[in-house]
Amino acid sequence: MTPPVANSFHEMWEELRPLGRDSSSGGYRRFAWTGADGDCRAWFRAQAEARGLAYELDRNGNQWAWLGATTYRDVAPGEAVVTGSHLDSVPDGGAFDGPLGVVSSFAALDELRRRGAEFGRPLAVVNFGDEEGARFGLACVGSRLAAGALTPEAAHRLRDGDGVTLPQAMERAGYDPEAIGPDPERLAAIGAFVELHVEQGRALDLSGDPVGIASAIWPHGRWRFDFRGEANHAGTTRLEDRRDPMLSYAATVLAAREQARLAGALATFGKISVEPNGVNAIPSLVRGWLDARAAGQDSLDTVITGIEQAAAERAARDGVELSVVRESFTPVVEFQHALRDELGAILGKERERPVPVLGTGAGHDAGILSGTVPTAMLFVRNPTGVSHSPAEAATEDDCVAGVTALADVLEGLACR
Ligand code: GLV
Ligand code: MN
Ligand code: MN
């Protein structure tokens, strides 16, 4: 007999928990095409096979587990209902961002079988590769490639911090980098994609709801700021003779905070590289990556322009050269209203009050697919509100509520 939802979730969660976890930080380091990523991929395949689902690896390294079909080629356009998320992580990420969606998808399928559901449409669970972009700097590489939002040529130019290119990394992991590219027929087979995700804020905690539905994703992007100055001796160079890019960078970090505050937006410098990176040397290069997000395109534009201006003014004062490159961008995503309302109606039936609908500043594969596929998201309460950190959390009861909600949704969408 198929185990009850809590057991099925718990067993999978415990199996996945140690993979790619750093014992000193307690965080996850599941970066694309590394050994830890490979372990997670092997776990996904084993889960698919244990359930008698047809396992399929697509041209971009995304993994699929099919029920009622063996590949998208068996599926008429718009017929498939797909659920899933990602298994990779940010540096020292939490356990839930991504994996909660994948584990809940398999557990929801178990729950539907336990209910004796009759599937009227093919159903698939997906694990999208390299969602976080922690290694190569660009988020959602697997779904962007599939949707044609990233060309194979541009993907081939991606490099990690050690200079390893994406094709080299894929090859070392046993995948064919020459195969990558758009997958329009696969996406055309999908009539609905539902991604369950841990909430990355405290809206559900504050409203007292275990589960919510996504309304929209803020426009967001990543910009690289290169400040080039002159390396020199920290102990002998007079202050007035220095061309110190660290000063320009520091002023830019403060300007980013101020611009974001004024616009009600978010701006973060969370990654930096310094050359030559010596304690007793003035840097020759400070490279900082800005992540910026806002509820609307206009405020995001205002924030970016303001930060660039502040950086340029300060760099000129410091005798430092500045260049700014936009490395990635995702426009605002408004999830399809019809599907979102359908989810609300399905979930509203069994629950005492309507399921809350909330926006998010976090990026997701669902956002990338939403241009081509009817897409929706479910959020599960996170009592800490913290994400991209080991402090990310969800109680087991809420995880089970999430699985049950996902099972209800899939039943409503895919079952007779
Ligand atoms: C992904 O989690 C992102 O929002 O950057
Ligand atoms: Mn994330
Ligand atoms: Mn995620």
Image (spheres, rainbow, N blue to C red):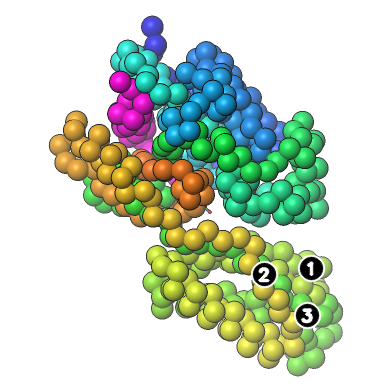
Residue at left offset 30%, top offset 20%: 416
Toward the viewer: 368 or 230? 368
Amino acid type, mark 2 = Val
User: Could you say which disc has been placed on residue 275 in the image?
Assistant: 1
Disc 1 or 2, which lies upstream in sequence? 1
| Residue 205 visible to the viewer | no
Judged by depth in the image, the label closer to the viewer, 1 or 2, is: 2
Query: With 412 as the anchor, is 12 left or right in this view?
Result: right
Residue at left offset 80%, top offset 48%: 164
Magenta residue check for 415: yes
Which quadrant does the N terminus fall into? top left
Tag 3, which secondary structure?
A: loop
* Pointer 2 residue: 325
Above or below, comparing residue 341 to residue 254 in the picture:
above
Badge 1, how many Cα within 10 Å: few under 14, some, many 20+? some
| Residue 378 visible to the viewer | yes
Judged by depth in the image, the label closer to the viewer, 2 or 3, is: 2
Disc 3 or 1, which lies upstream in sequence? 3
Look at the image and give the residue range highlighted in magenta. Answer: 389-416
Above or below, comparing residue 80 to residue 137 in the picture:
above
Query: Label 1, label 2: how many angstroms apart (C-alpha)?
Result: 19 Å
Q: Position of residue 41 (x, y in %)?
A: 62, 29
Badge 2, how many Cα within 10 Å: few under 14, some, many 20+? few
Q: Position of residue 206 (x, y in %)?
A: 26, 51
- Circle 2/circle 3 CB separation < 8 Å: no
Amino acid type, mark 1 = Glu
Query: Label 2, label 3: how many angstroms apart (C-alpha)?
Result: 18 Å
